[in-house]
Structure formats: C-alpha cells, structure tokens
Amino acid sequence: MCHHQHPTWKYNFKVNHLLTQKTISGQAIEFYSPHYPSTEKDKDYTEGTLYVTLKDSKQSADEVVRNGLEFVFALNNRVNFPIDLTKLESPPGWLPMIKFSGSGYDSITHNNPDNIPDLWSKYQKLIGDNHPQLLRSVQWFMRAIKSEDAIDKFINCWITFNMLYGWLTTVRGEDHNNGIKALLGMGIPRLKVQREIIAEQKAILTAISQMTLVGRDDGKDRGQCLALALSNTEPKEILFAAIDAIGILRHNIFHGIIKDRSNEAERCIWFLLHLDAEIIKHQLCRI
C-alpha cells in the first residue's frame, strides 16, 4: 500500500447475501465471493479488504466505512445489505479493532460490481471535499434504502428526487414539466442508462400506466399519458411521463385519496430508487 499524508485505516468487510461473480480490484478496495455461485446459508456472501483515508481526523473511520460501503453497494443494487466490518490496521494512537454486523435480505447477485472501486474513491472525495448538496441527497437516498415501511420508503425516495431537482435545475416557479425534463437531461444524460431504467422497471411502469391518475387542475389522466409514452421509443419522454404519473400518486397517497396507501407506495418505490441512484451516480462521477 502506498503511503498517505492523512491517517489511513485498513478494514476487512463481509457483505452477507451478496454474490459477486469475479474478483474486483481497485486502488483502495478488493472483494470477491469465495463460494460463488452457491446460495447456501453461510456461503452467500462477498468479502474483501479496503483502505480509507480521512482528511479530517475528527471523523469516525468506522462510520465512514460502514456508511460508505452501504452506500456504494446500494447505488448498484438498491437494497440495504447487512455488513460485517472488522478494522485491521489503524494509524498510530487509534484503537485497532472494532466490528459491526447487520441482518438483511435473501441472496442477490451483485449488479455491476466493476464500478465499486470508482464509487468508493468518489465517496471518499464526497466526504472529504465540500459537496453539501450532493451529500444531502445521498443522506436522503440512504434513508430510503434503509426504510422498511413502504410509505416511509416512498416518502424518502420522493424527497431524494426533490433534493436533486432543487439542486440540479435552474427552473423555478410553475414550469414544473420543463424542470423535470431538465433534471433528466442533466442527471441521466446517457441514453443507454435511460433505456436500462425503463427496461428494468417496465412491469412497474406498465402497471402504473393502467391506473386512473387524473390531475386536479387540468383533468388530464397521467396513466393514459404514461401508456402513450410507453408505446413510443423516446426514453426521456417515458421517464418524464412516469414521474408525472407518480406525482399524482404521491398526492393521492399523502392526502388519503386511495385506501391501500402502502400497496400504491410500494408500486412506485423501485422505479424512484433506480432513478435517484442513477442521478446520484452521475453526479459522483463529476466530483
């Protein structure tokens, strides 16, 4: 390991119920699943080693590592994974050993593990440099990831989206539609990523398009608008129509217009998490 000007810690970590198909190596992190592809109990995990360097020694390295690992794995897979964390090496004068553990989900094959080293590097820049707007968005995103109640999860997803909207767009006032389109253009500029979101969330978007979602002010049925968008091939228009439809659902959930609020909130969660994650990832790549 290279020498660092700031204090550096070394950790072992174990992510339960996450399967990684190959060894992933980066400058500060390396991990793999020793029993892949087994999903047997006590064999369905990813383990590895990482280094973390802190510019501000007042920060807790334990919390930085735990929060950072939860964050970078959540960005790709959009669930909260249980993590065991053991400190191996500390700078002189720091306590050498601490262990965290958690509980969680069924086995999941890691989605796009190759970008974890870069995400981990960007995360260290995020906490070390001055990026308050992005950091606040990340904090709300992780609240959504960790929420277990469907309505709480939906609310935190929506707040994350609005934090990103307020930060990344210059559109203000009543021009809400152009503001969302501007956010999609700035937040998810790559057509490939837009199409991937739509492909993965197609069943959810189709289900929402079959609902009656009439706006109070204009009488327009956003479900029909989404159905029409899905029949076209322009990804940004589909994403816009989906957000517009979920906006009506949000109003109905918040104001008690629908009876089964938890079911309707859960219907929207995974699309919003995917959208928020991709916008955050793109902003991380820019720091």
Image (cartoon, rainbow, N blue to C red):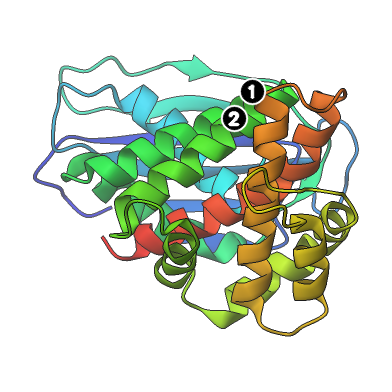
State the residue lying farthest toward the front. 218
Task: Say whether residue 187 is left or right of residue 237.
Answer: left
198 or 173, nearer to the observer? 173
Q: Which mark is residue 152?
A: 1
Q: How many marks?
A: 2
Q: Which mark is residue 41?
A: none
Query: 246 above or below 99?
Result: below
Mark 2 falls on what kind of element? Answer: helix
11 or 277, nearer to the observer? 277
Classed neighbour count for the residue bearing mark 1: other residues with Cα under 10 Å, few (<14), some (14–19), many (≥20): some
Task: Say whether residue 157 is left or right of residue 287.
Answer: right
Please give the name of the residue rendered at 45% of the width and 43% of the height, measured from the top-left corner. Answer: 162
Name the amino acid type tagged 1. Answer: Asp
Name the amino acid type tagged 2. Answer: Ile
Please give the name of the residue rendered at 28% of the width and 60% of the height, measured from the top-left corner. Answer: 170
Q: Provide the residue designation for mark 2.
A: 155
Task: Say whether residue 197 is left or right of residue 94.
Answer: right
81 or 22, nearer to the observer? 81
- Residue 36, percent from left and from top: 80, 53
Q: Are marks 1 and 2 in contact (CB under 8 Å)?
A: yes
Q: Quadrant of the C terminus?
A: bottom left
Name the image quarter holding residue 128: top left
Query: 223 above or below 69?
Result: below
Tell me the distance, in whole angstroms, between the alpha carbons under discs 1 and 2: 5 Å
Query: 118 above or below 137?
Result: below
